[in-house]
Structure formats: structure tokens, C-alpha cells
Image (spheres, rainbow, N blue to C red):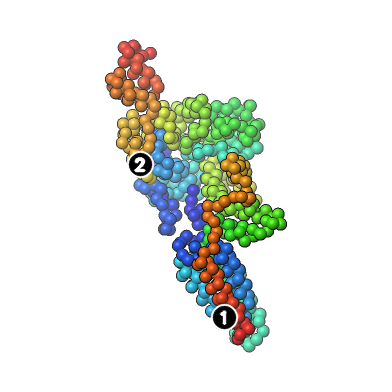
Amino acid sequence: MLVELGAVGYTYLPRSEAAAQALADVSLTVGSGEFIALIGPTGSGKSTLVQIMAGLVKPTSGRVKFEGNDIWLEKARLPERRRLVGLVFQEPEKQLFEMTVEDDVAFWPRNAGVSAEAVPEMTRAALEAVGLDYPSYRERSPFTLSGGEMRRVAIAGIVVMNPRVLILDESTVGLDARGRMDLAGRIRALNQKDTAIVMVSHDMDEVAESADRVIMLAQGGIVFDGPPREAFKQTDLLAGIDLELPQVARIAARLRRQGLLGGRLPLTLAEIESDILTAFGKVPE
Amino acid sequence: MNGRSLALGQYYPARSALHTLDPRVKLLLMLALVTAIFFINNLAVMVAAGLLVPVLATVAKVPYSWVIRGLRPLLFILILTFFIHVFFTPGARLAAIGPLTATRAGLRNGAFYSLRLGLVVLFSSFVTLTTTPVQLTDAIESIFGPLKKFRLPVHEVALMMTIALRFIPTLLSEAETIMQAQKARGADFESGHIFKRAKSFVPLLIPLFISAFRRADELALAMEARGYAGGEGRTRLHVLKVRAADVVWLIGGLAVIALVVGVRWAV
């Protein structure tokens, strides 16, 4: 297991009157190449949980293991172990600070002591992974870019670490529809190259298209952990945390009520397309 | 996010007579009281004035430990003041440590002056303990209001103070987030010599400044969009109004203070 959380809990301001429990008894594992969607309502502890998973925040109880090693036992090795997991924060473009795109993306390799000759190649690969052309962007100031481009540069700043687990905290929020789709596709491409992805999202369409496992968080605890198709059957759970089914599933549910569609619950566009074709007696390609 | 934003400032939320007292009355009484402390020239009276501290704390429903905490940043100066007086006041010899001689008069003076300093801080802290920063700036604006006649931008300065105070917790939590985000890509804020460490704060400070400027811009726009035009003709949600209780406090407070000052000439 790449990342393993054992009975993790987190309390703000422990031992004070204002103590507030953000997470309680959370156990989960992230295996190589998985694509996990982390969903839950605002205030359910998602952001705290991903910071714990990235080894940035120490849980107030429980254990965090990276590749079997309890990371908080040997603090000296913590910076080096954090390379395993890359965390892209919400609105990551707010953390850009260098004069050029190239310098900003190269922040990690230079800090980590990567040899100077290897840095440009890593930077190029990271920028291309997020869909930015290296030669035309490298010299530009990140602050002259559009919001969407800044977001991509910031994500490249994490991708450049080549993490085995990439955590994205609502990274496509605020992008236009085309930018969203494109970025989602690039994240899937990273996943196909064996990077495990943990994606915090409120967008169930995105979850249905990409994830192969869904973890539902409510009030600081895991209420569901399983495949998307199972997750979207938990209508009570979903309603309880104010999440709707993916649009495709909602359309299918209506067609089903009209008796036009039967069988499985389609989650993606491709699935509903083939279901409808079958219903009309045509053979899906 | 972390708890730092909660512990900001000294304000202790409670419902007490002191909390509901008009902040202008509080400010004036505090000024009078602190001035009075400087008129006291007698250790016994000073100790008696000191007894006001637990009385005020009880009235304000603030725990004693919370009140005393206000002295912490001053502790070193208090102790230094005490010992300088103990050892450097001429008088009857009490004890000697090496070349230093403690005197009876020194002990007296040391107690007197460190008590004076401590009381000044404690009494003024009762204002900040029982008044929210926003109330405080309102009171300042009201007290200095007459200066508007001389074209001094009293309202604007008070507004700036309020906005600055309002955004301190926001900036703190944002700094925390950016710090974590930079740590996530290998930034190290903790180790190295002083220059290296100062340099390591660049990735924190630049984003923080950018967002502070952007926020200031947006706030100005938002205020203009809602037609905010500043002091002239503006009405308030919380109007400061002097109530009977405020007058009683003011008169009673001034009487006690007059008594404290009067002792100087009476005895």
C-alpha cells in the first residue's frame, strides 16, 4: 500500500474549550494506480483529511503510513517521504510566486537537490502533462497568465515531483467547461501512467467519468467506500450529504420511470448511449 | 485553518456590566484611572488601588488567569524595574550580594514602581478585555469626531483601523494555507541559518502580498458598488448611546479616581 491511514483522528485546539473534532477514526488505504474520488459536504473534513494523507498535517490520533513506514515516527525522514504524495491545494494558483513559469515549476526540483541538468527536462515534462507548451510558456510571468493557465502551472508545480499519489483538492473548480474536461482528461492520463489519484470533488459527473473508487465522508467519518456504481445506489446517503446523482444517471432514472430503459444504472455518457441504442433495437458500436 | 485566529487579541467574550458599558466611557475612565495611578505617591494607596484589579475582574466576569496573562509580555521589564530599585536606591543596608547592596528603601521603591507599571497595564487591559476591536474604533471615531471640523479624516482613519483588524485572522489563515501548499512542494521554513531562512519566506510572502492587494482592491470595489460614501450622512447599525448606567459608571468611576488622587494631599 502506498498510503495507509489507521484510525486517524484530528481535533482542532485539543484540550481547550474551543476544541472541535474534524475527523474521527478514519481508516483507508491508497493502492498503486487507483483513482479515488473523495466526496462529502462542506465541513465534512475532506481538506483536513487530504493534508493528513499528504503528510503535511499530523493527526491528533492514529497512524499514517507511507509504503509501510509510520511517517511521524521518524521526523527527520519526513521531507524525503513526502515526495511519495503530491497535494494540489484548492485554488493552487494562489501559491505562485516566481518571476517565470519555468522557475515556479522548478521550485521543487531545485529544493530537492535534483541536478541542474535534469531540471529543465522535468519542468518540460510537467508542463506538458498539464497541457502547456514548454517553449512558449517557460519565460512568461505566471501573473500575466489567465486563471486557467495559472491553475495548470500550479498543478505542474506538484506534478513535477512525480508523486506516486497525486491528490487534487477541487482542482477543476472555477475553470470553464472546456478547461475542466481537458484537465480531467490529463489527470486520467497521469493515472494511466500508474499515478494513483485522489480527487476531492463536488462534481458527480466528473466522479462518474473518472473514478474507480468512491470514498464518502460525512461529519468527519467515512460513510461509504466502494466502486462508483455502488456509491450512486446509496441514494439515502447521497441525499443526506446534499449530493445529486450524475446527470446521466438522473436522465436514466427518468427514462426508466417512463419504461423506456431498464437494466443497469448508467453513469457515463458512453454507457447511457449504448443503453439507449440497445433500447431502440440498434447495436452499439 | 488553525486556532490562532481564535486566540487573536485579548477580548474575552462575556456578558457583564463592563462589557455593555459604553466604550467611550470605558476609554475615558481608563485614561483617568491610569493618570490617577501616576498621582499616587504612597505604597499603601498603590496596594489599595491594586485591589481594584480583582474587583474589576469579578465585575467583568473575566477569569483572573486571563487578566494576569496580559502582564506576560511585560514580565521581564517588571522584574528588571524591581531589582534595579532594590539594589540602586541609597538607604539602610538590608543584604548584600557581591558588590550589590539591597536597601530597605530600595525594596519599597522596587515594589512601588513595578506595581505602578503593572497596574497601568492591567487597568488599560480591562478596556481591550471587555471591548471588541470594532466597538473600540467606533468609540475612537466618536471621541475624535469634533476634529472633523478641522478636515481631519477621522472617519476614514477609524474605518481603516476596523478593516485592518477585521482581516488579521483572514490573513493568518491564508498564510497558514500558503505555507502548507509550499511545504507540499518541498519548501522548508524551519531549518538553515538566518539568511537562508529569511529567503525561504519569499514563497510565502509574495503570494500573501498579492492576495492582500487583490483583496483590498475587491473590497474597495464592493464597497463602492454598494454605494458606500464614507462618514457624511452614514447611519450606523450600532449607535453609541449614553445610557443611565453609563452615567452612573462615569460619575462613580471619577469619584473613586478623585479619592485616589486626593489621598496624596490629604495624608
Q: Residue at x 55, y 72 (%)?
A: B251
Identify whether B50 is placed above or below A6. Answer: below
Residue B195: horizontal and vertical position, in percent?
A: 65, 51
Q: Rounded to the nearest whole Å, what is the CA distance between mark 2 and mark 1?
A: 64 Å
> Label 1, on which residue?
B45
Q: Amino acid at mark 2?
A: Ile
Identify whether B169 is placed above or below A27. Answer: below
What quarter of the picture does the N terminus of chain A occupy?
Answer: top left
Q: Is residue B267 visible?
A: yes
Q: Is residue A113 visible?
A: no
Determine the secondary structure under disc 1: helix
Which of the pair A217/A53 is nearer the observer? A217
> Label 2, on which residue?
A222
Which of the pair B40/B248 is nearer the observer? B248
Q: What is the chain letter for disc 2?
A: A
Residue A280 falls left or right of residue B242? left
Residue count near mark 1 (Cα–Cα under 10 Å), binned few <14, some 14–19, many ≥20: some
